[in-house]
Image: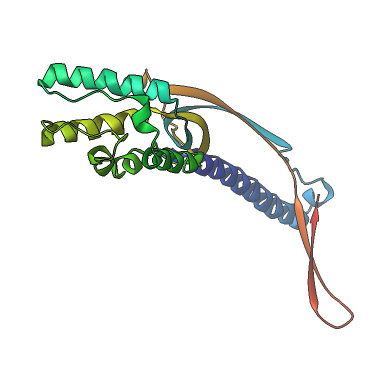
Amino acid sequence: MIKLSDYLDYLNNEIIQARKKADENAVLIAKEYARHEYLKYFKVPRYALPSVKMDIPIKITDIDSAPKYNFKLNQDQFVTEINERIRLVNKEKKLNIPEISQKQIQTEEFKTLFSKLEKNDQKFGKLPANEVLKLDLRNKIQLLNSGIFRPQDRTTEEETDELKEIFSKVLLNKYTLVNAKLNNIYIDPNTSAAEDKDKLFINLHVEMEEEGIRIVSYKDKDGNEIEQITFE
């Protein structure tokens, strides 16, 4: 598995080296012509490569990208999803977790939490699962203040943990992919393997136009050596 940029750089370097060897060989032949009794009157043959065109099938093996996620919270939907999961967990695990109301998440503690998540969105990176898991949700759930959701007295430690897990999962679901930045494309030039029939293949069309550079060295009036680069 190699980077597409490295592969194209390799092809470019190989073509340049081929052109260099062709020019070196042309110089050697020109010297032979110059020394030959009769060939010195003939034009020395030399073939240029004004352009090189290649159609190369390659296999995409991996794509390295940085996605950008956006956190948006609709309180009605949030409460609905929380309560749906609460009912499901209560049924599956025989628990008695109370459902929540929208009023219970309109406290300053929860407003601060949601505001913090919204400020951290629109950044390139992975889905912020670790960031959500690190949130201090347990303390918010266990707050006893009026108007803030809290488990009832009979709620067990297991139910508190389950509710924290429910909050984490629903919060994570509020992140949506809005953009992605492509970092690298990894390829495999070998496209003949039978096990790769389900992989993504593309046909790479490469066209390289000839462009020469010439470096001329000279000295200025003060005796300083100057190099001048001319593009041809």
x, y percent for residue 163:
22, 31
Q: Where is residue 1 in the image (x, y as percent from the top left)?
A: 39, 38
Q: How many labels does the image show?
A: 0
Query: Which residue is most to the right?
Result: 221
Q: Can residue 199 be seen in this view?
A: no
What residue is at 79 percent from the left and 76 percent from the top? 225
State the residue at coordinates (31%, 43%): 135
Task: Give the answer, above or below, for where 18 lies relative to 36.
Answer: above
Q: Is 111 placed above or below 20 here?
A: above
Quadrant assignment, res 117: top left
Please name the residue shown 25% across and 21% down the image.
Answer: 85
In this orientation, which residue lies closer to the viewer: 177 or 87?
87
Q: Find residue 93 and report its image quarter.
A: top left
Q: Does residue 179 appear to the left or right of 108 in the view shown?
A: right
Q: Can residue 104 be seen? A: yes
Residue 221 or residue 109, whichever sits in front: 109
- The figure's colour scheme reads rainbow
Q: Residue furthest front?
A: 146
Residue 91 in percent (x, y) is at 14, 16
Percent across and percent down for residue 98 are 21, 24
70 sits to left or right of 152: right
| Image quadrant assignment for residue 160 | top left
Classify residue 126 as left or right of residue 22.
Answer: left
Nearer to the camera, 131 or 107 = 107
Query: Above or below — where is 81 with respect to 151?
Result: above
